[in-house]
Amino acid sequence: MFAVSNNLLILSEGTSDKVITYGVRENWHNAKLKIDREKFLMAIKWMKFKGIIPEGGGELVEVKGSK
C-alpha cells in the first residue's frame, strides 16, 4: 500500500483510501483480489495512525503480476 500510495503521489493522481485500495487490490497482483477491501481500508487507517505516510519521493515501483 505504501508503494501504491507513493506511486500515486509521484504521478499526481488521487490518493483517497478508495483509490489506494483499488490500486493495491485490482492493479497490483491477482492474489490480492482474494483479500476483502475492508482489510485494506483498515490497514490504511493503521498506517496513517502510525505516521507511515509516503511523500511521493523516489522512483515509481513497477506493478508486477497484474492482470
Image (cartoon, rainbow, N blue to C red):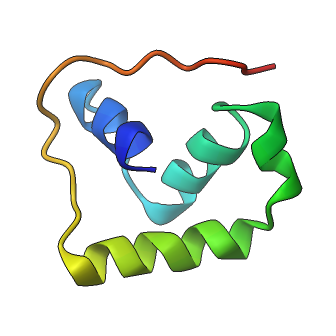
Q: Would residue 12 be found to the left or right of residue 22 on screen?
A: left
The residue located at (23%, 65%) in the rendering is 52
Q: Would residue 31 be found to the left or right of residue 45 on screen?
A: right
Q: Nearer the viewer, residue 46 or 5?
A: 46
Extreme residue toward the right, this view: 34
Residue 41 rendering spot, x and y as whole percentages? 57, 72
Residue 22, above or below 8: below
Residue 38 rendering spot, x and y as whole percentages? 70, 76
Q: Quadrant of the C terminus?
A: top right
Residue 55, above or below 46: above
The residue located at (18%, 73%) in the rendering is 51
Residue 18 rendering spot, x and y as whole percentages? 56, 60
How many numbered discs, if any?
0
- Is residue 13 visible to us here? no
Q: Nearer the viewer, residue 61 or 5?
A: 61
Q: Quadrant of residue 48?
A: bottom left
Residue 10, above or below 15: above
The residue located at (23%, 79%) in the rendering is 50
Q: Nearer the viewer, residue 6 or 14?
A: 6
Q: Quadrant of residue 55?
A: top left
Q: Would residue 47 be found to the left or right of residue 38 on screen?
A: left
Residue 48, above or below 19: below
The residue located at (46%, 50%) in the rendering is 1
- Is residue 25 visible to us here? yes
